Image: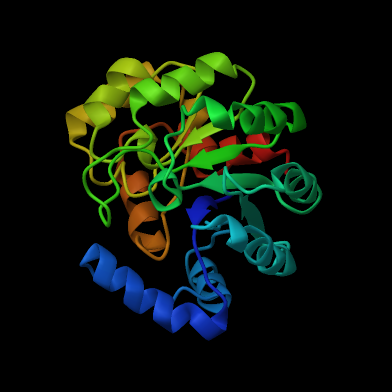
Amino acid sequence: MIIIDSHTHVWPDKVADKAKEYLEHSFSRPIPAVPTVSNLLKIMDENEILKSVIASVASRPDQVQSINNWLFSIRKDRFIPFASLHPFYDKWQEELDRIKDNAFGIKFQPEFQDFYIDDELIFPVYERIQKLNIPVLFHCGVELSLPGIIHAGPDKILKIITTFPELKFIGAHMGGFQIWDEVIEKLAGKNIYFDTSSALIYMKKEQRDRFIAKHSIDKILFGTDFPFGTQKNDIDFLNALDISETNKVKLFGGNIKKLLNI
């Protein structure tokens, strides 16, 4: 069975140790591995993972180009880059052209980038992304390192996917970290993809059962949120669920392959 991790993060070697320290401090939890390209590849090999999506985030507009330059440089057969785009980067149109040529998708982190996803000032960006047919991965729900305001909740997500019905919207963390009941009520069954990273393993069994019963299995993607999660634990957990082998094939790799045409 092909396994593709649809949600991971790594940093350049020269800053990876500092990134690990920062993450442990911000999230008040241990990070199992230094988040480097070589460590991710090693762990992928240990767990028979064919490919991983590497998602990067520019907290400030001026970081977009340099982050993407690095991300594009590590593109390999095993890595699927999801580039960064700050919604208020003044050269976003030119950067989208570069992303279309060099990456497979885009990652937005509304908490770190300090924007509400349904801000209509950003709609021209979404419209262009939709036209270019670029999948977009959004952090959704609670952000543990910045608790309080939720920038990408179900109502805001619903506004986006209704306004841009052809946008390939991927809601990370099953569409809303720690607010899954609301996600099930308002988003499950809609034209939206969800990834399992830092979510499925934390949900109550009845929440998982309701979610999977209501939402198409073809629109759920396996993800681990490495380095926050361990790929082995997430694989073992998903394998233990009462899901048919046919559906596990879709979840582990088939759905993301189809979505990204890889």
Residue at the location (27% across, 43% down)? 142
Residue at the location (51% across, 35% down)? 170
Residue 65's x, y, as percent?
68, 61
Q: Nearer the viewer, residue 192 or 215?
A: 192
User: How many marks can you see?
Assistant: 0
Give above or below for 21 relative to 64: below
Residue 8's x, y, as percent?
49, 58
Quarter of the image for the C terminus: give it: top right
Give above or below for 233 relative to 118: below
Residue 51 seen in the figure: no
* Quadrant of the image occupied by residue 21: bottom left
Q: Nearer the viewer, residue 122 or 188?
A: 122
Q: Is residue 66 left or right of residue 225?
A: right
Residue 35's x, y, as percent?
46, 73
Q: Nearer the viewer, residue 133 or 63?
A: 63
Q: Is residue 62 left or right of residue 25?
A: right
Residue at the location (46% across, 50% down)? 113
Give above or below for 124 relative to 24: above
Residue 238's x, y, as percent?
36, 45
Residue at the location (22% across, 49% down)? 147
Give above or below for 51 relative to 32: above
Q: How is the image coloured?
A: rainbow
Residue 88 seen in the figure: yes
